[in-house]
Amino acid sequence: MIGSTLAGMVGVLLILLVVYDAIRTTLSVSSSGGPLTNRLVSGLWFVLLGIHRRQKSHAMLSSVGPWMTVTLLMTWFLVAWLGWFLLFCSAPQAVVVSTTKATASLVERAYYTGYTLTTLGYGDYVPGTDGWRTPPVIAAANGFFLFTLSITYILNIITNVIQKRQTALSINALGRDPRQIIAATNDDGKFATLVSQLQPLQQSISTLGQQHLAYPILHYYHSETSSKALSLAIARLYQAISLVYFASPKLDTTTREQLSIFQRALEQFLDTLGGTFIQPNHNIPHIPELNGYAELPGFDKSSTEMHDYLASLPYQKILVAYVQKDGWDWKNVWQTEQE
């Protein structure tokens, strides 16, 4: 293997791949990460979600996000290590023993690559010719870049996960299902309380949409309890706002406009997720009979009319896909779960 030009070419391609993937994943505000990241995290989530669906284990899914992040960062480093190792194997004099100038073995080259990437620089192995003095410097810079980028990425992920769960808790504080949200913010059909609560939430949800673009791995941070699950909170709030907008004739113009604006904010958030994380279902999800909703103060529509209205909303297909991809069932949107 030592002295193989092909090994050097493959090594360079792996180095370029990991650098591109890291930059695309951490610095590019797009709807997806790099090619390596996408295949790794989506593949792992697909397998674990399949296991979860056979035997419900929210505890297992809640541990996936942190371990997936660590696995991703280790994959970057290991692929970079392999790439530089192959490059240092492409010429016999790329690495030699510092004291005897003997050609280094494969194991010694792997060791040399590792301590060069980690910038430890023990010095017991060195480049054998002047032409091979530059690559180790670039390798050390590459390792430093990956380590620095990884630490920054982890800190940003932690901050964004906290905000994601805080937003879910804020929504669930209004009610644990659509009916509770409507009843708690009714104000005899005027819904002034609902509008006042939605104004700070609108900014949070818009920010979360951009954070999911910047950090696609946020999709895979699952909450063990439904009260902290953003997917359920968004779905419940969307149902409640849609029903209030449709069934309450006492809404003044300002309130109705505010509800419409917030509904569009939720739909923009769902459009963000619909790029790569979820694919809309082909069918509208099951809408319950809404027994008791027609008796809520200020409502003048029948349960059947409200049911048909919700079933006509196209974003329901994205919502059910979001809830299911997050490891929950659609029935959790409508039923208060005991935790």
Image: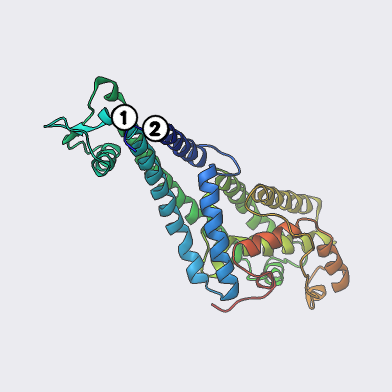
Left or right, 267 with respect to 224, comes to right
The residues bearing labels 1 and 2 have C-alpha atoms spaced at a distance of: 8 Å
Please say if 274 is above or below 137.
below
Of helix, strand and loop, which one carries label 2? helix
- The residue under label 2 is 8
Residue at image point 84% right, 60% down = 312
Left or right, 147 with respect to 122, comes to right
* Amino acid of disc 2: Gly
| Residue 193, visible in the rendered structure | no
Left or right, 208 with respect to 281, comes to left
Residue at image point 46% right, 56% down = 68
The N terminus is located in which quarter?
A: top left
- The residue under label 1 is 91
Whether pointer 1 and pointer 2 mark residues with C-beta atoms closer than 8 Å, the reply is: yes
Q: Quadrant of residue 233?
A: bottom right
Q: Quadrant of residue 147?
A: top left
Q: Of residues 288 and 200, which is closer to you in this image?
A: 288
Residue at image point 70% right, 68% down = 178
